Image (spheres, rainbow, N blue to C red):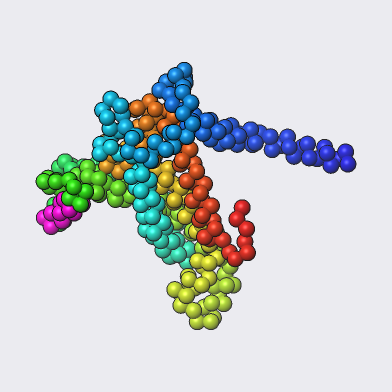
Amino acid sequence: MKTTGVYKLHIFLFLLPALILFIGILIAPIAMSTYYSLFEFKTITGADRTYVGFQNYTTLFSRQLWNPETQQLFENNKYLGDALVNALILAALSVFVQLPLALLVALRLGKGIKGERAYLSIFFMPVLISTVIIGRLWMNIYSPEDGGILNAALKSLGVDTWLFPKITDYIRSSRAANGINWTGTFTGQWTGHREIALGAAFIPILWQYVGYHMLLMYAGVKGVPTDLLEAAQLDGCTEWQVNRHIIIPYIKPILRVCVVFAVTGSLKSFDLVYTLMKDTTKAELPSTLMFKLLFLNQDYGMGSTIAVLLIVLCFAFALIISLIFRNRGEKVA
């Protein structure tokens, strides 16, 4: 009995450093943000802190969320509902565009091709580059000036003569539906219009993280037992049938992880959008709105409220995705 108690004490002591880090880095900040979200204060010391209960949460989704000096929060009286819609659109694009592309590349590379290692390095290289550097890089690509790579390429190919008018008509009709009479023309400001800015932000996100998901899936494809593949070949299965009925079901746990990362990453996305755009109201996200409230408006209570909401959403989506991907009879951890 004494030996068992000593053994459990040793286990506890070995786990204690990791437990302290877990509580200090994850649990404590969540608890503090939840506590701060119940107050309204403008100073970082909290000297002017006033308890408001859940008022911040109710205000967050209303049109009353504005700057008292300008009588509006930001351009178009932007509020969290719009930012959440943008985040969900970004998540949908990541799941239904980025992940299928990563899966196709992983399936192709996983079956062995010439230069396989080189392709892996090339696809994974953007993941190693700082997001701020990528944002600056794509700023130069999207630049409406003469040095903008994208606009220069479109003009050299003559595509701008029919593409730009179509984008102009799309922006005009979209704003007309919202009661806004816009008489301007699109001349290559890819991050300057709310109607297309989110799509422009998704392209560098796709370019950066498709290699990350591809590598995870590639490792799963390489882990498929060869005897299953050989048996399928003997039965005369086509490559599509092997992928659909053997490989993809086998790597289902990895696909679940990739979907969770893609969705939660979209909800938390900040650095690339903030670096890429001078005016993030064109593609407002919850994290950019939180930054503005915390550091520009110095509204620490409301900023903490958005932080808590993001945490809840990330946990909720992770749980929902786990429920969708679980096998029959399997319990969700």
Instruction: Give the tally of numbered discs.
Output: 0
Indicate whether residue 59 is drawn in magenta: no
Depicted 87 relative to depicted 274: above or below: below
Q: Quadrant of residue 72?
A: top left
- Identify the residue at horizontal 44%, vertical 19% (top origin): 48
For residue 263, side relative to residue 220 (left or right) = left
Tell me if residue 11 can be seen.
yes
- Identify the residue at horizontal 25%, vertical 39% (top origin): 76
Say which of 231 and 262 sits in front. 262
Depicted 36 relative to depicted 164: above or below: above
For residue 280, side relative to residue 41 (left or right) = left
Depicted 56 relative to depicted 171: above or below: above
Say which of 10 and 94 sits in front. 94
Tell me if residue 133 can be seen.
no
Magenta span of residues: 161-174
Residue 44 position within the rendered picture, expressed as x and y whole percent measured from the top left: 44, 22
Hey, which residue is sitting farthest top in the picture? 47
Residue 308 position within the rendered picture, expressed as x and y whole percent measured from the top left: 48, 38
- Identify the residue at horizontal 36%, vertical 55% (top origin): 93
Residue 7 position within the rendered picture, expressed as x and y whole percent measured from the top left: 80, 40
For residue 15, side relative to residue 75 (left or right) = right
Quarter placement of the N terminus: top right
Say which of 60 and 313 sits in front. 60
- Identify the residue at horizontal 46%, vertical 22% (top origin): 49
Depicted 51 relative to depicted 22: above or below: above
Residue 244 position within the rendered picture, expressed as x and y whole percent measured from the top left: 48, 71
For residue 330, side relative to residue 293 (left or right) = right
Say which of 132 and 300 sits in front. 300
Q: Quadrant of residue 135?
A: top left
Q: Quadrant of residue 328?
A: bottom right
Q: Main secondary structure of the magenta part?
A: helix
